[in-house]
Amino acid sequence: MDNPRAGPLFIIGGHEDKDGPRVILKAIAKALSGRKLVLATVASHEPDGYFESYQKAFADLGLGALVELYVNDRAETHDAAKLAVLDDAGGVFFSGGDQLRISSQLGDTPMEERIRRIWQEGGVLAGTSAGASVMSDTMLVRGASAESYRLGDLHMAPGLGLMRDVIIDQHFAERGRIGRLLGAVAHSPRVLGIGIDEDTAIRVDGDHFEVLGNGAVYVVDGEGVTQSNIAEGRSDCALSIYDVRLHVLARGDAFDIKARRPRDQQNPIEGRSKNGGNKPH
Amino acid sequence: MDNPRAGPLFIIGGHEDKDGPRVILKAIAKALSGRKLVLATVASHEPDGYFESYQKAFADLGLGALVELYVNDRAETHDAAKLAVLDDAGGVFFSGGDQLRISSQLGDTPMEERIRRIWQEGGVLAGTSAGASVMSDTMLVRGASAESYRLGDLHMAPGLGLMRDVIIDQHFAERGRIGRLLGAVAHSPRVLGIGIDEDTAIRVDGDHFEVLGNGAVYVVDGEGVTQSNIAEGRSDCALSIYDVRLHVLARGDAFDIKARRPRDQQNPIEGRSKNGGNKPH
């Protein structure tokens, strides 16, 4: 994120519209401006059909080309023919599945290095669902949906680390995941929790992002937390945490990650609200 | 709430345990100390079986008696025989169903007046699910679960008004209802949003409450909100709202409604945290 030449990240909460107005896919196609896109279906155990569905969805959006990248195992990430799929790519799109498959197959391999370089040299990286979770340096792997967070019930692992100091969750409102995102933030309030609804995305450029799509994006900021039972509570006890700051963002809203503040649309440089009262705390 | 003689309110998020440790029902029975409890099944269109299930659940918990109160229509709330069911009652428990049935059948009737007086004279009022929602002066009637709040998609109505300046939602984490509670609070940040999980309750005494049961209680405080699109946004657009304060409380945690602050368990009078940093804002 400290590289001014790096391209945008599109982080999508899953189930992006593929046959309607396709707001998110259009924005990705636009950012590619005619370059080739690699669809990495690595997250899926059974990637059949993924490529075809994106081929159809992107068909008339002006991509230079759309090609699939799949690896059955980690050894293939060294394979010259597989790596050649990334030649001349203007971007890589990670489809859904299991985020652990992406990180365990690609982490610290020549293929990951190649993908990272595409981005660092101005290419577009996008990911949906599992492909979204894997963008941050620590990623949520498992944790109950549709219930409050219980101490001990969360599994995190290193992600690809393209976005720092955040942890991303997807299918957010649809699967009732505020509980587990609060649990993740309680573990380390330094990290901003970002929950992204289905058919909703953030476009990250450097230290800020903008929301696009149909739903909402939740930012859970634990910096001001005054008390929680995360370290002392009994395992399986419900999480208790006081003074979380929560922002809900809709399309067009923008957020400054470093300042931990929504950007005011009328005064984007200052990052203050119309009401004028809210300083970074 | 300004009446020091009023009894406790038990507000339950639905599905309270009826055949295990029964923490919530035991607390209600204890507060009744041998007095008679009236089970009001008014919220249900088909109350068959409700009474029997609570009879079984309360069987060995030392109630003076458990009797059922049901009204088919509003006219029956004037009926002397029906009203006599409330004679000598030490408490009333509203079971689940449709909150509009409770408010539309009982609101502003002699029966409501009688129930309110039982409470004001030290009796216990309890409600679960629909019976919980109806406790506040404005209640949530309808609104989507498991999605982010969309402008216009919320129906509120006057409740029984036993608890002021709050709006209550139930089955909270289980049905993914943070979105609609944020929507309710966005309408009027003066009102605290209280979301209660299943098998979880708050016991309200005057201006504070304590959490009991298995899950969590979410307090959504909109007082510090700096910006939202609730008044300007297009209908069906996702809600945008900045700087919501969120507290998640687990069993044993207590909250001061007037000060809008969790109470520190070590120093309940001051209402400050162990860290000492949080003043009422």
Image (tube, coloured by chain):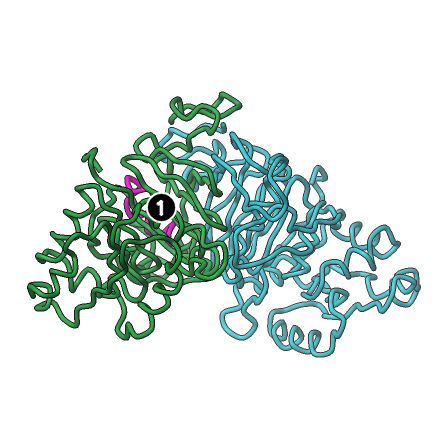
Chain colours: A cyan, B green
Say left or right for A191 vs A272. Answer: right
User: Where does residue B179 sit, x and y in percent of width and height?
Assistant: 42, 54
Residue segment shown in magenta: B180-192
| Along the viewing direction, whichever of A42 and A121 lies nearer the viewer | A42
Say left or right for B55 vs A250. Answer: left
Residue at the image position 93 percent from the left and 64 percent from the top:
A80
| Along the viewing direction, whichever of A34 and A59 lies nearer the viewer | A59
User: Where does residue A213 sit, x and y in percent of width and height?
Assistant: 50, 60
User: Where does residue A271 sit, x and y in percent of width and height?
Assistant: 48, 34
The chain identifier of the residue carrying mark 1 reads B
Say left or right for A175 vs A134. Answer: left
The secondary structure type at the circle numbered 1 is helix
Q: Quadrant of the N terminus of chain A?
A: top right
**Residue A113: in magenta span:** no
Residue at the image position 36 percent from the left and 39 percent from the top:
B209
Say left or right for A182 vs A4. Answer: left
Q: Which residue is tagged 1?
A: B30
Residue type marked 1: Lys
| Along the viewing direction, whichever of B210 and A17 lies nearer the viewer | B210
| Along the viewing direction, whichever of B170 and A220 lies nearer the viewer | B170
Check the image and report above or below for A232 versus A38. above
